Amino acid sequence: MVKSWLVSLFKLFLRNKRYVLLGFVAVAALILFTSQIKAFFIISLLGVAATFSTFYKRVFQAPPAFELITLTVVAVSIFYGPGVGTLYAIVISITSEIAAQALDPFSITYIPPRIATAFVAPWLYGNGTGPVHNIAMLGMLMSILYNALQQPVYYYLTDIEKRIKGLYFSAMNIPLNLLIFKFLGEPLFEILKSII
């Protein structure tokens, strides 16, 4: 004798074949690719935060002295490797400029210093065993590296406005990144250590 609740469940599955199939595919993907899916979601979340951290440029038209790009590039490259950190740096450098409607010819100059940061940060930190153990100090060093590689583009221009913009950015970005890494970086690294 067939149980009536099984028949009704089977009919429900038949009526919603597409959703049942998608559910099975999702469960199979979670079982087979859990770490990759987790990495995708973590990197995507960090990317959204970094992209919209410079959104205020739409209103103020000021250099983005406050940004989460450096923090997230460092975190992604430390926890997922410099290759993934490089791809992340390229994508986020472009998407943050597009989101802030600040895309200009100088936007391309932000990418190589961020790539350098993606390669140097894991080497300096070394999973806590490298030469730099303090996350706030790591943030300050990565911010100095980024500014040392990117700001000469502005300093060598003859336009005084661009030079002032570069000087303002460096003077504000380095101390702000020290605070960002101290207050946001340390908890972020602890969360990522426990998740990964």
Image (cartoon, rainbow, N blue to C red):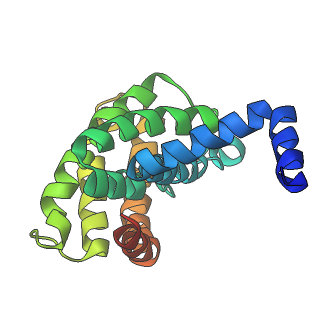
Identify the residue at the far front of this view.
Answer: 1
Quadrant location, the C terminus: bottom left
Q: Is residue 150 visible?
A: no
Q: Nearer the viewer, residue 159 or 122?
A: 122
The residue at 25%/39% (across/down) is 83
Q: Residue 92 in the image: x percent, y percent?
A: 47, 39
Q: Residue 78 in the image: x percent, y percent?
A: 26, 57
Q: Nearer the viewer, residue 53 or 33?
A: 33
The residue at 58%/38% (across/down) is 25
Q: Residue 116 in the image: x percent, y percent?
A: 22, 42
Q: Is residue 23 visible?
A: yes
Identify the residue at the far top of this view.
Answer: 105
Instruction: Name which quarter of the figure residue 139 lies in.
Output: bottom left
The residue at 55%/28% (across/down) is 103
Does residue 138 lie above or below 162 as drawn? below
Q: Nearer the viewer, residue 33 or 13?
A: 13
Instruction: Name which quarter of the figure residue 24 lies in.
Output: top right
Left or right: residue 179 versus residue 83 is right
Q: Residue 1 in the image: x percent, y percent?
A: 84, 51
Does residue 111 lie above or below 40 as drawn? above
